[in-house]
Image (tube, grey):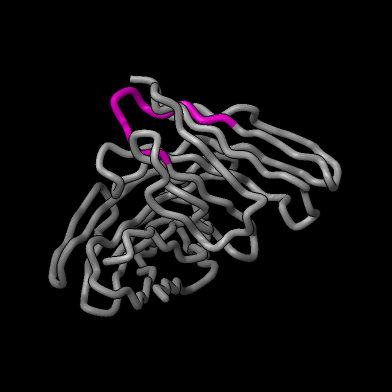
Amino acid sequence: EDQVTQSPEALRLQEGESSSLNCSYTVSGLRGLFWYRQDPGKGPEFLFTLYSAGEEKEKERLKATLTKKESFLHITAPKPEDSATYLCAATGTASKLTFGTGTRLQVTL
Amino acid sequence: KAGVTQTPRYLIKTRGQQVTLSCSPISGHRSVSWYQQTPGQGLQFLFEYFSETQRNKGNFPGRFSGRQFSNSRSEMNVSTLELGDSALYLCASSPNGEKLFFGSGTQLSVL
């Protein structure tokens, strides 16, 4: 059975303090690794798709990377508006998207 | 372009009742998926529909069912509600079954 595990569960950063979120996956025949952002009271919002080990994608202060077992979401010089829950998901040969339970990020002034 | 619309936004039911949730996908998207989100379990996949056919199904009991209409709108039904069905139910549409666009969800409370 496909599994996606995210760590840490929660992370508190000061504004400008860079860090990384981890997503470990066990997926048969990985077809895609996805990162989403979810704000309270809203549905997840798509951030990135990664397809193969070594791939990297960037958007503003966020950069996602992928290895054969893990993905990282690097947050550089975060701002309070980056506070949200970040979700990782993966799909493989079973064609079902499996989500991790997320990392709750809080960025303070 | 309008996003994914889910109705109602909030719903309160009692045990044993049934409920129907509605989802209107982004225009042109033929794939619609449903997820259950709870604080302890995260997002759990319920099912996916594509062109009115169920393409994939998660590990939920038969009390959970869905359908998709010819205009791609989808409904999800839960019969004989249990307390444990209290959750945020999210609908997502997709142009290709992979990159998902989520609605804001229906918050269901079962008393």
Q: Position of residue B12 (x, y in %)?
A: 79, 37
| Residue B111 vs residue A63, the one in the foreground | B111
Q: Is residue B28 magenta?
A: yes
Q: Position of residue A5 (x, y in %)?
A: 44, 74
Q: Which residues are magenta?
A: B22-32
Q: Residue at x 46, y 55 (%)?
A: B57
Tell me what residue is drawn at x 50 percent, y 42 percent: A43
Tally of numbered discs: 0
Q: Is residue B93 visible?
A: yes
Residue A71 appears left or right of A8: left
Residue A91 position, x and y percent, is 31, 62
Q: Is residue A11 left or right of residue A74?
A: right
Residue B39 lies in the magenta stretch: no
In depth, the one of A87 and B57 nearer the eye is B57
> Residue B90 vs residue A36: left or right?
right
Question: Residue at the location (64% across, 65% down)?
Answer: B40
Q: Is residue A108 above or below residue A43?
A: below
Q: Residue at x 27, y 37 (%)?
A: B95
Q: Position of residue B36 (x, y in %)?
A: 58, 51
The quarter of the displayed image where residue B102 is located: top left
The quadrant in which the N terminus of chain B is found is top left
Residue B65 in the figure: left or right of residue B29: right
| Residue A74 visible in rendering | no
* Front in this rendered view, residue A30 or A106: A30
Q: To which quarter of the image does residue B71 belong?
A: top left
